[in-house]
Image: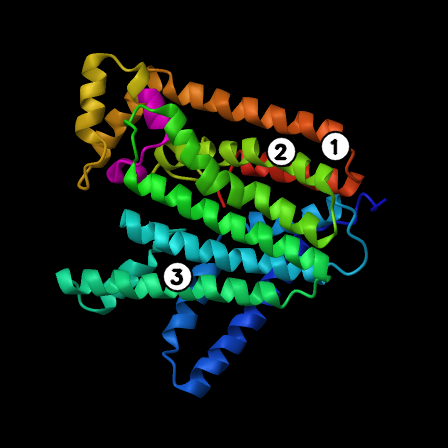
Amino acid sequence: MVDAQAIDLRVVQRQVDGVLEDFLSEKARAATGRGHPPEVVQSVRDFLAAGGKRIRALLCVVGWHAAGGQGDAASAVRVAASLELFVAFALIHDDIMDDSASRRGRPAVHRVMRAQLGGGERAERLGAGGALLVGNLALTWAQELLHTARLEPGRQRLVHGLYDAMLEEVMYGQYLDVMGTGRGADDIEAALRIIRYKTATATIERPLQLGAAVAGAGEAVMDTFTRLGLPLGEAFQLRDDLLDVFGSPDGACAPGLSDLREGKRTVLLALGLGLADPVQRERLGHLVGRAALEEREAAEVRDILQVTGAREQTERMIASRYEHVLRVLDQAGFPQAADRALRGLAAKATQYTS
């Protein structure tokens, strides 16, 4: 059994960051030698340095421990680092599609490139195109880094199969989010479906399974991570949606305007529209999705989401999923260190963003 003190998540994060820094340093040297534009690697570096708690990477390594991984965790750490480059790709592209102004407190990559080109319609188009290519390279490098993890042949096939499935699921989730296929703004199940594809699998379930696959886990462990990962991933996104609109009670996360200005079809908004009276529903329809939404108007939206009970119901959805995760862990029988780390990460994922 792994000792209860064996998993130091701060050490794991430093190891993951070290792999990323070494990999991107080599990419920067190669770009210089071949005459490639150096700002591409720097854009990815800056994005990774802007923040994020590396929760996917941490879950990957903890999944390795939970599945009985022994000895050197270097292969699991490299797979975990690859996930962070994959996340960079997904978020850079997501910001382009939503035309988000910022990410993790810094201007979004496409906005930076737009500003470098001087502004205007042409700069907007070219900045989006440049950021799209940066995101594509982040994905290419994610897969390249994945190939550097020294895996046994049988485990390699499973790891790459899970990674491919994760990519496909995220693409489908993003497509559903962009196209809004066959749903209204108050369609809660459709909003949850997008969360499952776009967030729950890639944020929780697949990272855990990837770490477990590196350790040679069997089907029972993989099934446990599905039963644990999907509800935890949903709770993670529901919390993120609440934080974006309302901020956190301790003030560490300030209320934002991005989701409201973009008219993002969240579960929170779907609940608000479903619970609203006709007057409140009309106001939500008028205000949400306005690019020039001001803070006083956002305060009105927040008030409607509060008084209708949409905020409280979203909190209950998070709590019920978190409690489900704890029940799964109670029955899983993971090594004590892995169990402790998973419980801590589950609490973190349902309270804060990454």
- The image's mark for residue 101 is none
Is residue 351 shown in magenta? no
Mark before the other along the chain sequence, 1 or 3:
3
Report the residue marked by disc 2: 228
Q: Residue at x 63, y 29 (%)?
A: 325
Q: Amino acid at mark 1?
A: Ala
Residue 121 in the image: state x and y as whole percent: 13, 60
Q: Is residue 293 above or below residue 22?
A: above
Quadrant placement of the N terminus: top right
Residue 229 in the image: state x and y as whole percent: 59, 36
Q: Is residue 310 visible?
A: yes
Mark before the other along the chain sequence, 3 or 2:
3
Q: Is residue 101 visible?
A: no
Q: Quadrant of residue 328?
A: top right
Residue 347 in the image: state x and y as whole percent: 60, 34
Q: Nearer the viewer, residue 166 or 39?
A: 166
Q: Residue at x 43, y 71 (%)?
A: 41
Report the residue marked by disc 3: 135
